[in-house]
Image (tube, rainbow, N blue to C red):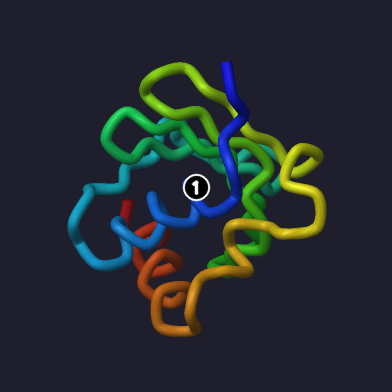
Amino acid sequence: MTTLTAREVYQCLRDAALGIRPLQRLGLQPVHGLLEVGIEGWQLTLDVTGNSLHHCLRGQSPDGRVGTCDSWQRTDPVSLLSTWELAQVERLLKDA
């Protein structure tokens, strides 16, 4: 099975920012700055401080493929978001 790429996880976050896919929290409260979210079968572990999204530490697609910050080398999916997309995702995280 292939590993998820940073671009695939970015696309999932981008779709949520654009309102194409709904974003929901999978846990009630962040644990140590980590927030689990779901986006139409995708599961992402995000590093969040306050209302600021910093990194995506792990992603799992609906077909079971997994990607982590180690497998993405130096490209974090969050860093691929535009300023507007990042602001939209942060708003969704706050409202979720």
Please tell me which residue is depicted at 27% across the width and 35% down the height of the picture. Answer: 40
Residue at the extreme bottom of the image, as rendered? 83
Q: Is residue 95 above or below residue 46?
A: below
Please tell me which residue is depicted at 40% across the width and 83% down the height of the picture. Answer: 84
Image coordinates for residue 82, horizontal then vertical, percent: 48, 79
Q: Name which quarter of the figure residue 38 lies in.
A: top left
Residue 43 lies left or right of residue 19; in this view the side is right
Image coordinates for residue 11, horizontal then vertical, percent: 41, 55
Along the viewing direction, whichever of 5 and 38 lies nearer the viewer: 5
Residue 49 lies left or right of residue 25; in this view the side is right
Q: Residues within 10 Å of mark 1 (few under 14, many from 20)?
A: many
**Mark 1 belongs to which amino acid?**
Val
Q: Is residue 80 above or below residue 95?
A: below
Image coordinates for residue 41, horizontal then vertical, percent: 32, 28
Q: What residue would you read off at disc 1?
A: 9
Please tell me which residue is depicted at 62% across the width and 49% down the height of the picture. Answer: 56
Q: Name which quarter of the figure residue 78 lies in.
A: bottom right
Q: Quadrant of the N terminus?
A: top right
Image coordinates for residue 94, horizontal then vertical, percent: 40, 61
Q: Secondary structure at mark 1?
A: helix
Along the viewing direction, whichever of 13 and 23 lies nearer the viewer: 13
Q: How many marks?
A: 1
Residue 94 lies left or right of residue 10; in this view the side is left
